[in-house]
Amino acid sequence: MIINASIDLELTQNSGQTSQPPWKKTNDSYSDLVYINNNPAIFNVMQSGKNIDFSYTGNVTEDAAVEKLKEIYDLDFDLNKFYRYLDSYDELKDMAKFCNGLRLFQAKDPFECVISSICSANNSIKRWTKSISDMKVKWGRNFNNHYSFPDVKIFNDLYLDDEEELFETNANKNNNLKACGVGYRAPYMRKASEIFTVEMDLSDIPKMSYDEAFETILEVPGVGPKVADCILLYGFGFRQAFPSDVWIKRIVSHLYFDGKDIKVEKVREFGMDEFGEYAGYVQLYMFHYARKSGLMERLK
C-alpha cells in the first residue's frame, strides 16, 4: 500500500540517527522486525515516488501496522510546514534543498535507542550500528531471520567481557558485550539495563516533561547531555531536544556566531531557545546539510 507522506527513505535510513541501525536492505526494499502489542511483524518499505510503499507480514491489524509505521518514520510530521519555517531564516533556508524528505527515524524499541545512543558516543556510525546488529543476532528474538533487540531483562544478565564469561562458565564463546565491539561502554550498557529493570520504567519517560525526562536519563552511567538528548529525540519523540556535539557546535558557530568558539552546552541552550518545537529537526537537518553541502569539510 502507498502511504501518502513524502520521505526520502534512503536518506532517513542512513542518517545515523541513534534509534536503531538501518533496516535490512534487499534490492530496493528495507525490512525489519517490529513488535506490536508483543506480536511480531516483518515490515517492508520501499520508495515510491516521494512516498512509501508499505507491506507487512504478521498477525497484526492493518490499522495497527500503519500506525506503527507512521510512528517510526514520523509520517504525521508536516514537512512542508517545516520547510516554510526553514525558508523564513537566512541561516536555514538552504537546508531543505540538501535534505529534502529527511524525517526522524524513531525507535521501534526505546531500550534499543538507549543502548544505541550510549554505543554511538565517540564512535563511528558504521561501528555502532554493527555492534547493535550483532547484539540483535546474539540475544534477540528471531522471527523469519529478522531479529529484535534483546529484552531489557535479558540484557541485564549478559556477560561484560571474555574474562567474566570465562569465570562464570569455564568457556569463552564470545557471548559477551565486548565481543560486540562496544569497548569501555559495556559496563554502562549493563548498568542501564539494571536501572531500567529495577529502578525505573522506560514507559514512564514519555509521560514526563522534557526537563524531568532529561534529568532522569542523565542518571544512567555513560549518558551525558548529548546522548540524553539523542535518547529523548529518537527514542521518545521529544522534538525540543537539540543534541549537541563538536560538529553541531562548529555548524552553529559558523551560522550564528561568526565562527567564535562557544561551549557545547551553550550551543544546546541556543538551539532549544531559538528553534523551540523544531529544535530536533533543525539539528538533524543542520548536520546533514553540512555533510552534503561541503560545509563540514570547510569547518574541519
Image: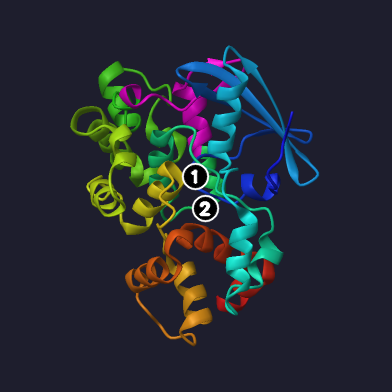
Residue 124, disc = 2
Q: Which residue is mark 1?
A: 128
- Which amino acid type is marked by label 1? Trp
Q: Nearer the viewer, residue 47 or 278?
A: 278
- Residue at left offset 48%, top offset 85%: 259
Question: Quadrant of the image for the N terminus?
Answer: top right
Mark 2 neighbour class, 10 Å CA radius: few under 14, some 14 to 19, many 20 or more: few
- Residue at left offset 40%, top offset 57%: 241
- Residue at left offset 52%, top offset 74%: 251
Residue 276: % across, % down: 42, 64
User: Alpha carbon of mark 1 to alpha carbon of mark 2: how far?
Assistant: 6 Å
The answer to whether the residue labelled 1 contacts the one labelled 2, judged by CB atoms less than 8 Å apart, is yes
- Residue at left offset 34%, top offset 40%: 206
Disc 2 secondary structure class: loop
Q: Is residue 214 visible?
A: yes
Q: Nearer the viewer, residue 147 or 62?
A: 62
Q: On screen, 280 above or below 40?
A: below
Residue 94: % across, % down: 66, 72
Disc 1 secondary structure class: helix
Q: Coloring scheme of the render?
A: rainbow
Residue 143: % across, % down: 57, 15
**Bounds of the magenta segment:** 131-154
Mark 1 neighbour class, 10 Å CA radius: few under 14, some 14 to 19, many 20 or more: many
Q: Is residue 44 left or right of residue 156?
A: right
Q: Is residue 167 left or right of residue 263?
A: left
